[in-house]
Amino acid sequence: MKYVSLVLFTSLIFGVNFDFKAQECEVIMTLYRANMKPLANKLVTFKSEDENHSIDIITKENGFCRVSLKQNTQYHILYQDIIYKDLFKIPRSNFLECTGPLVIDGGLFTAVKMKVYDSGGDYSLLKNETIICESKSTGKLYEEKTNENGLVEFYLPRNASYDFHSVFEKYIQNIEIGDGGGISIYRISLNASTIPEKQYQQRIGRAEQEELEWIKQIELEDSLKGTIPVNVLLFINAEMESGHEKCPHLGKIYIYKSKDKNIMYGSVYGNWSISGLCENGLSLCLNSVKNNDGSFSKAVLPLKLKRGNHKFYIEDEKGFIKKEVNVEVEIRKSYNYLKNNSENFYLTSPICIQY
């Protein structure tokens, strides 16, 4: 009796354990995405609907996974932000093999396949071309490259609109994806064309080279422009140093090449007193220094000068002003214009003095 009782007691103990083991079911399945590519080497979670059981596994290269789940329990599969709720209830069985691929995000996403052609050449299919898909609602960007057959594939949420771009060309295609009519695997095929990225790179290279050549040409013309003398009308602009509101009329002022006064260029009669003119690099309008007959007034002295800084010595007839001055001649016309019109081109430049 003792032996029988011990066996019965032991059986009862192990029976509980056997019942616990029997509550688990070894499930084998292969997980796929809606683009029918295996969910390879990814972390997924099997979570019971009552949230009393959860287990994490990593899928194999082909999406294969083996997991022990509780019998008679409904499970969800969680992967990133996807919750697959259509996994059937685990039966009262020790083993279950799910045949065929299990698409965990069926009904949520759409596989969009697009053939991309060369619009800048012979309209051939573009290989290894970067294509960008932009969600109109969220602004999220998806980037993929075309394969050897010019085909690119995107895996996009449903019920949304998308624009497609190449690297240098926007809006090569667009699409609005609905709910797919409730089908789990929803595929869309599109065609698009764009100028290849390689051609754009070549264009950029040519444009950069052309810009360098243009800069060199501008620099050359700018240097040549400084060799052409033009007609410069010198005038006196006198500003009061302080304490006076108006500068007096200075009378005749003589303009010499240097302080030794060996060479006198001529004279101007009177002066302008325009505040800020010299400081801001301004000049006079030609009409303001012309007489009715087209000649220039005595308030200016015409000289032939090249672009740049020129030194002069000035004295007024009363001897109040005796000083060396600098005159900056700025020429804003192009070299080609000056080459053909230097004799008829005039500009005004101030001799700036403080009085």
Image: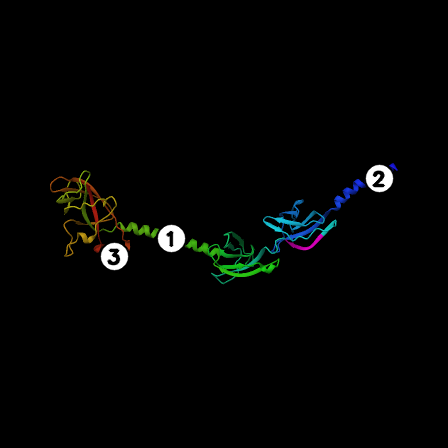
Q: Check disc 1 and report the residue beneath it.
A: 211
Q: Check disc 2 and report the residue beneath it.
A: 7
Measuring 19% from the left and 48% from the top, which residue is drawn there? 234
Q: Nearer the viewer, mark 2 or mark 3?
A: 2
The residue type indicated by label 3 comes to Asn
Q: Residues within 10 Å of mark 3 (few under 14, many from 20)?
A: few
Magenta stretch: residue 102 in it?
A: yes
Contact flag, marks 1 and 3 (Cβ < 8 Å): no
Q: Earlier in the sequence, mark 2 or mark 1?
A: 2
**Label 2 to label 3, Cα distance in Å?**
123 Å
**Label 2 to label 1, Cα distance in Å?**
97 Å
In the drawing, what numbered circle is on residue 340? 3
**Label 1 to label 3, Cα distance in Å?**
26 Å
Measuring 57% from the left and 60% from the top, which residue is drawn there? 188
Q: Nearer the viewer, mark 2 or mark 1?
A: 2
Q: Earlier in the sequence, mark 2 or mark 3?
A: 2
Magenta stretch: residue 69 in it?
A: no
**Residue 150, position as x, y percentages in the image:** 54, 59
User: In the displayed structure, does residue 135 sit left or right of residue 57?
Assistant: left
The chosen color scheme is: rainbow
Towards the viewer: 229 or 91: 91
**Residue 225, position as x, y percentages in the image:** 27, 51
* Quadrant of the image occupied by residue 337: bottom left
User: Which stretch did the figure color magenta?
Assistant: 97-103
Q: Residues within 10 Å of mark 1 (few under 14, many from 20)?
A: few
The overriding secondary structure of the stretch rendered in magenta is strand
User: In the displayed structure, does residue 188 sit left or right of residue 52?
Assistant: left
Q: Residue furthest front?
A: 50
